[in-house]
């Protein structure tokens, strides 16, 4: 109770300093929040694109039904595969006429259907990365009646690279702004400590331990960080709504991300306060 009472009293004694510290923390975490929203929406967009990733196996015309069934069963037995769909030559021609209406006359003038039958292999979630797709494609090499396998190698590689770049950029920038937030809180706590230096020295003279002196400042720093986290969350939400209404729709980040952001603000405040008070107690 003493720790809580003293931490709240410290905030009340310097409301302007606490407000400025929380505002600076909020601005630093606001940038992190913007990158979190951007990363989450990029992840969602890439996930929707990845759902279309599939392996298309083109089959020779003289394949027997038993051989085709054997290939289908082999594909379905792979952990990377969720489903297999057979596309006949006639269905492939219908699709081509639908997707390419500008070549309608050319298709009608053909006496023989030149399009091959195929198997469309749908990949399971979590197995749409380049290595998994490559394994599925390589599996078909043992079948002599497979004419060609296509899966857009370069397109998948670029998709995977975009996901990695987004994650790395967010991690680096988020860490940088988190450090800035920690330094801001540490500075604010050091100012608060300096303003109460006489009180701290009297407490040490009467036998107060470092832990007893340290706890209110730790809680004060954590509360300042949590307040900054809530302000950053509010700013991020308002920015997301503004962009969604004026430019293009954005998805709001998951609830666990928001809780993690506020908790991160409190953690930054706690750690920064710990360093500040520890340094001061060593000096005195």
Image (cartoon, rainbow, N blue to C red):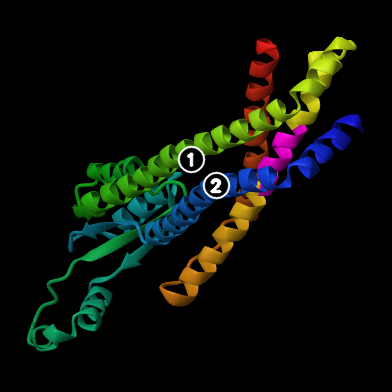
Residue stretch in magenta? 219-227
Q: Secondary structure at mark 1?
A: helix
Above or below for 187 versus 70: above
Are circles 1 and 2 on residues that touch, CB within 8 Å? Answer: yes
* Residue 220 drawn in magenta: yes
Mark 1 vs 2, N-terminal side: 2
Q: Closer to the camera, 182 or 264?
A: 182
Q: Closer to the camera, 97 or 200?
A: 200
The answer to whether residue 240 is seen in the rendering is yes
Mark 2 = which residue?
A: 29
Q: Going 48% across and 50% down the picture, which residue do you hit?
A: 31
Q: Going 60% across and 49% down the picture, which residue do you hit?
A: 23
What quarter of the picture does the N terminus occupy? top right
Indicate which disc residue 177 carries.
1
Q: Secondary structure at mark 2?
A: helix
Indicate which disc residue 30 carries.
none
């Amino acid at each position: 109770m003493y720790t809580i009472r003293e931490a709240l009293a410290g905030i009340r004694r310097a409301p302007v300093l606490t407000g400025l510290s929380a505002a600076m923390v909020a601005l630093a975490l606001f940038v992190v929040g913007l990158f979190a929203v951007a990363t989450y929406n990029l992840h969602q967009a890439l996930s929707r694109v990845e759902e279309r990733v599939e392996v298309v196996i083109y089959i020779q015309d003289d394949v027997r039904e038993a051989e085709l069934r054997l290939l289908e069963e082999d594909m379905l037995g792979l952990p990377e595969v969720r489903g297999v769909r057979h596309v006949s030559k006639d269905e492939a021609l219908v699709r081509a006429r639908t997707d390419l209406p500008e070549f309608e006359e050319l298709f009608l003038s053909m006496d023989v259907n030149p399009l091959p039958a195929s198997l469309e292999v749908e990949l399971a979630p979590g197995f749409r990365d380049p290595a998994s797709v490559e394994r599925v494609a390589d599996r078909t090499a043992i079948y002599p009646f497979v004419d060609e396998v296509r899966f857009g190698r370069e397109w998948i590689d670029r998709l995977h690279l975009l996901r990695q770049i987004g994650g790395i950029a967010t991690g680096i920038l988020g860490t940088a702004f988190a450090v800035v937030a920690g330094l801001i809180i540490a500075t604010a706590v050091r100012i608060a400590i300096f303003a109460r230096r006489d009180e701290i020295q009297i407490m040490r003279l009467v036998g107060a331990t470092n832990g007893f002196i340290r706890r209110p400042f730790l809680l004060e720093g954590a509360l300042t960080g949590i307040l900054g986290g809530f302000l950053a969350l509010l700013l991020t939400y308002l920015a997301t709504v503004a962009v969604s209404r004026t430019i293009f729709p954005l998805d709001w980040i998951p609830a666990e991300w928001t809780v993690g952001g506020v908790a991160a603000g409190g953690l930054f405040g706690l750690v920064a306060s710990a360093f500040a008070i520890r340094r001061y107690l060593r000096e005195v």
